[in-house]
Image: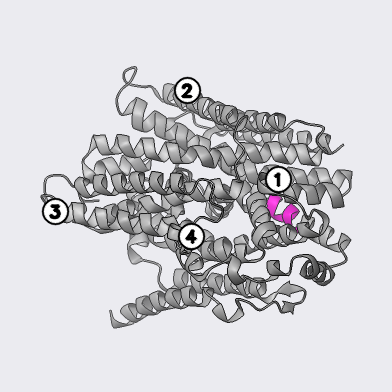
């Protein structure tokens, strides 16, 4: 259970970290262009990739056991979970 | 030629929708929930396509024309974070309960959970009323698109009517199965064509860097968030994407998933899909300041279409216009079908209006309601002239503020009908207050602080739910889920 609890904690911490990272005050008035795109936009595109990677980790490591159980039950009873 | 291409596209969509009618099993569950058989890729595409409306293309480009790249921070990256979280924690739970109890709608789930028929009816009314502006932006978007890409040759009402007729046809024939397949096709199309639009137009402007340098001369404020996007607004805007948890059409798609693991692809790939659609729209809105520097008010809704008409030749312009139609219809169909589902299941069947319904009759009632609601929306579109972005945000505000009721129903055993009533009443009163207080105030925020009304209403709804539930007698109002 300790391992599972740690994974859950990391999951929530990761989401909080993403929330904080999203508010990039350090680029708020910066008009620098990265490959022609304002840094304030480029940063958030990278953020989307980061979020996707984090969610991949979550569905791989934090997928609730009860959902797989619900599927198995549905398969046994012909559709009703 | 442009008009011909768009009409050809609409016929193609109709063919796909009608073809899937042959796969339909003519039961209520198949019409309203595709027999709960939707797989991963189709679920991702249909959820994303349903979620991305004319708001994501026309609204985002209009807003970036006005305030610059900050609109991506406000809506796109907040959605990229919040929407998958809602799918992960709420969507999967709703799916499981739908399988266990056979729920078809949100009202179904809430009635069962809180043991209150009256609450279910009140919630139905609020959900439907909040959907009207959301439907409206789709029909309006269709009108704007067709008028602009034909250089004004076609009146706005014609585009709105065409889009309404096509959507009503395939939705009423094929239900959710047809809707899901058409959405998958349309979502792929508007993602590809949206990217192509940006590449072609930006090339005509001399490349991204050259175009951005041009913008920095005429409107440098568009390149930064700065004062256009206050800190308080960014923080509180994060609550807006929570609306996805209470959208009737998203709820319907959740229930249609074949298995729980079907949710994995939507959760992982959603942020990338959002970036793929919003980046081109935001950039083109910003670049619109170069060619169309003097657009005001509702005119800005058409900046993306003006760019397409100005910079892309006939065939390409037609294809790109079809891409915008794809984005609009991929939401309009699910929204109207979800209302048809709710009316049939939560009102007609529940109250046995007309007696016990046969499966074919359920389908017929659902179809009639779809026709009625889209027809009504079209009539309203003939007179309404608001900002697409602004109207959508008010709809999202209402749905987001209702989410505490669903969260309490799913995860808090102490939640009761009293709490649900208190929360619903709080949302209605505060939403109306802030809506009327905001009239004539561009960039409205609570007391001019930058805080969005959604923050106040969401907190109010949460407190009301908690207080009402804690003060109420712990039984016999609630049932376990």
Give the structural element (helix, strand or loop) at label 2. Answer: helix
For label 2, the residue is B364
Quarter residue B60 falls in: bottom right
The alpha-carbon separation of the residues under discs 3 and 1 comes to 50 Å
Q: Residue at x 63, y 51 (%)?
A: B59
Q: Nearer the viewer, mark 1 or mark 2?
A: 1
Q: Is residue B38 above or below residue B128?
A: below
Q: Give the labeled residue for mark 1.
A: B299
- The mark closer to the camera, 3 or 1, is 1
Residue A55 in the image: x percent, y percent?
49, 70
Judging from the image, mark 1 belongs to the subunit labelled B
Which chain is mark 3 on? B
Name the residue tied to disc 3: B471
Looking at the image, residue B228 lies above or below residue B344: below
Horizontal relation, residue A46 to residue B249: left or right: right
Do dots 3 and 1 share one subunit?
A: yes
């Amino acid at each position: 259970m300790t391992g599972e609890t740690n994974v859950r904690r990391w999951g929530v911490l990761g989401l909080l970290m993403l929330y904080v990272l999203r508010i990039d005050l350090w680029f708020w008035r910066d008009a620098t262009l990265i490959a022609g795109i304002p840094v304030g936009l480029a940063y958030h595109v990278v953020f989307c990739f980061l979020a996707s990677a984090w969610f991949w980790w979550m569905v791989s490591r934090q997928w609730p056991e009860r959902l797989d159980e619900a599927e198995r039950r549905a398969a046994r009873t012909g559709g009703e979970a | 030629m442009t008009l011909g291409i768009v009409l050809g596209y609409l016929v193609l969509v109709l063919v796909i929708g009608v073809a899937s009618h042959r796969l339909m099993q003519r039961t209520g569950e198949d019409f309203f929930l595709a027999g709960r058989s939707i797989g991963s890729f189709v679920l991702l595409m249909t959820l994303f396509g349903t979620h991305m409306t004319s708001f994501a293309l026309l609204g985002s480009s209009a807003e970036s024309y006005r305030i610059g790249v900050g609109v991506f921070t406000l809506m796109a990256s907040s959605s990229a974070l919040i929407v998958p979280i809602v799918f992960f924690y709420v969507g999967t739970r709703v799916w499981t309960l739908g399988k266990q109890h056979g729920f078809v709608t949100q009202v179904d789930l809430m009635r069962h959970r809180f043991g209150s028929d009256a609450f279910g009816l009140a919630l139905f009314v609020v959900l439907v009323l909040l959907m009207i502006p959301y439907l409206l932006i789709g029909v309006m978007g269709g009108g704007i698109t067709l008028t602009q890409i034909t250089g004004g040759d076609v009146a706005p009402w014609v585009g709105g009517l065409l889009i309404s007729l096509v959507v009503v046809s395939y939705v009423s024939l094929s239900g959710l199965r047809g809707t899901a397949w058409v959405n998958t096709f349309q979502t792929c199309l508007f993602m590809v064509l949206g990217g192509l639009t940006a590449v072609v137009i930006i090339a005509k402007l001399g490349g991204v860097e050259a175009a951005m340098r041009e913008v920095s001369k005429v409107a440098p404020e568009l390149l930064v968030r700065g004062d256009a996007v206050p800190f308080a607004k960014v923080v509180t805007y994060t609550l807006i994407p929570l609306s996805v948890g209470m959208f009737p059409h998203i709820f319907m798609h959740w229930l249609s998933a074949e298995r729980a693991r079907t949710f994995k692809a939507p959760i992982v790939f959603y942020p990338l899909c959002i970036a793929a659609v919003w980046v081109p729209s935001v950039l083109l809105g910003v670049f619109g300041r170069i060619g169309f520097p003097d657009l005001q008010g509702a005119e800005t809704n058409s900046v993306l279409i003006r760019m397409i008409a100005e910079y892309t030749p006939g065939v390409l312009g037609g294809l790109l216009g079809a891409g915008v139609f794809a984005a609009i219809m991929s939401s309009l169909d699910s929204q109207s079908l979800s209302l048809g589902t709710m009316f049939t299941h939560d009102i007609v069947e529940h109250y046995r209006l007309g007696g016990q319904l046969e499966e074919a009759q359920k389908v017929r009632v659902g179809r009639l309601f779809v026709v009625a609601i889209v027809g009504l929306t079209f009539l309203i579109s003939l007179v309404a002239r608001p900002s697409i972005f602004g109207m959508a945000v008010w709809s999202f505000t209402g749905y987001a503020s209702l989410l505490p009721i669903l969260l309490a129903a799913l995860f808090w055993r102490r939640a009761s009908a009293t709490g649900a009533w208190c929360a619903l009443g709080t949302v209605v009163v505060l939403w109306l207050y802030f809506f009327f207080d905001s009239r004539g105030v561009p960039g409205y925020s609570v007391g001019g602080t930058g805080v969005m009304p959604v923050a106040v209403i969401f907190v109010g709804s949460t407190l009301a739910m908690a207080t009402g539930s804690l003060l109420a007698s712990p039984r016999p109002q609630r049932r376990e889920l």
